Image (cartoon, rainbow, N blue to C red):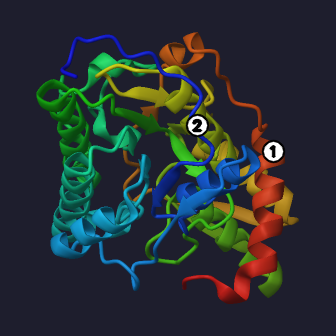
Amino acid sequence: MTEGLQFSPTELDRDATFYVAGHRGLVGSAIVRRLEAAGFHNIVGKTSNELDLKNRDAVFDFFAAEKPAYVVLAAAKVGGILANSTYPVDFLSDNVRIQVNVLDAARESEVERLLFLGSSCIYPKFAKQPIREDSLLTGALEPTNDAYAIAKITGILHVQAVRRQYGLPWISAMPTNLYGPNDNFSRTGSHVLPALIRRYDEAVAEGASSVTNWGTGTPRREFLHADDMADACLHLLEHYDGPQQVNVGSGTDVTIRDIADTIASVVGYDGETRWDKTKPDGTPQKLLDVSKLTQTGWTSKIDLREGLERTVAWYREHVNDLRI
C-alpha cells in the first residue's frame, strides 16, 4: 500500500498484540487502562530498565520478538519550563533517539496501526488562537521548550514520511496540557498543574501562610485529564486516518491564576497566593482548535474540577511513592 490508496479505519482486533511505549507514564498508563476496559487481551509494555528505547539494537530485537500489530508511542522525556530550559540537549537528543528507534523498528516490522503522541508546544508561540493543526511550522517556537518541540515536530514528520514512502496508515495526535494519575509531581521536573498540586498540598500540611508561584498568573492554558486523552487515542485509531496531526483537548482554557485558585480550593488551602513576576510566564495562551477531532465524533467528558479532585486524591494516596 502507498500513500493515497484507500484505508478505512475500523475496530481494532482485541486479540492482537498492542505495544504501549511508556506504559507507566501519565498518558501510557491511562491508555493501558482504556485498552483493558475495551477488551484488549495482549497489551505489552516494558519499563526503561527492561527496554532502553534509546538503544536501537534493543528496540529492533524487541519488535522482532513481540511483533505488535498496534503501537502507541507515548514514551518521552518530559518536564516543565525549568527542566526544558535547563536541559535542552537532553530533551532534544533523548526524544529524537526514542522516536527514531521505535518508528524505524515499527516500520521494519510493518506495524499495522501506530499513533505518535506529540505535544501542543509544537505550535508557534504566537499562533492564532485557538490553534489549528495547519499552524504547524508557521512561526517561531516558545524559547523555553523549543528543543522538546523540535523533537516532537520531527516525530510528526517521521510519521508523515512513513505514510508517503511505505503507505502505512500511521497517525499523530497532539494533546493539550494533560494531568491525572501517574503524573510527574517532582519539584524540578513537573509541569504546571502537578507542580501546583504538590505546592498547595504541602502548604496545607505545613500550615504555610502563603504560596509563591512563578510568573504573573495571566497566561491561559487548556487542560485535559489523561483518561480522556486515552479514550481519544483509541477513538482516533478506530475512526481517523490522515497525514495531518490531530489536536486533542477540551476546547476551553483557564488562566494559571484560576487553576491555582481551584487547586487551592480542592486541597483545602486558605492562605495567600503570591506571584513572582521575575519568573517567566511562557506562552501567553495555548488553546487548541479541536474541531477536526470533534468531527470524528469525540469530545472530552471529564470536568476540570472533577478531574482535579480525582488527581489530588490519587496524589495523596501515592505521595510517598512519587518522584521527588
Up-down: is 191 above or below 90? above
> Residue 115 location in percent, x, y?
41, 40
Mark nearer the N terminus (1 vs 2): 2
> Residue 231 location in percent, x, y?
65, 38
Q: What numbered label is drawn on residue 248? A: none
Disc 1 residue type (three-letter): Arg
In this view, the residue farthest toward the left is 165
- In terms of image quadrants, where is residue 90? bottom left
Classed neighbour count for the residue bearing mark 1: other residues with Cα under 10 Å, few (<14), some (14–19), many (≥20): some
Up-down: is 81 above or below 90? above
Instruction: Name which residue lies at 45% across and 33% down.
Output: 286
Front position among marks 1 and 2? 2
Q: Is mark 1 on a helix, strand or loop?
A: helix
Up-down: is 304 above or below 262? above
Instruction: Name which residue lies at 20% across and 18% down.
Output: 3
Q: Which of 188 and 244 is in front in this view?
A: 244
> Residue 148 location in percent, x, y?
26, 54
Left or right? Give the position of 294 relative to 262.
left
Which residue position is annotated with label 2?
A: 234
Number of dots carrying numbers: 2
- In terms of image quadrants, where is residue 60? bottom left
Which residue position is annotated with label 1?
A: 305
The C terminus, quarter of image: bottom right
Q: Which of 167 and 265 is in front in this view?
A: 167
> Residue 39 location in percent, x, y?
72, 47
Classed neighbour count for the residue bearing mark 2: other residues with Cα under 10 Å, few (<14), some (14–19), many (≥20): some
Left or right? Give the position of 44 relative to 230.
left
The N terminus, quarter of image: top left
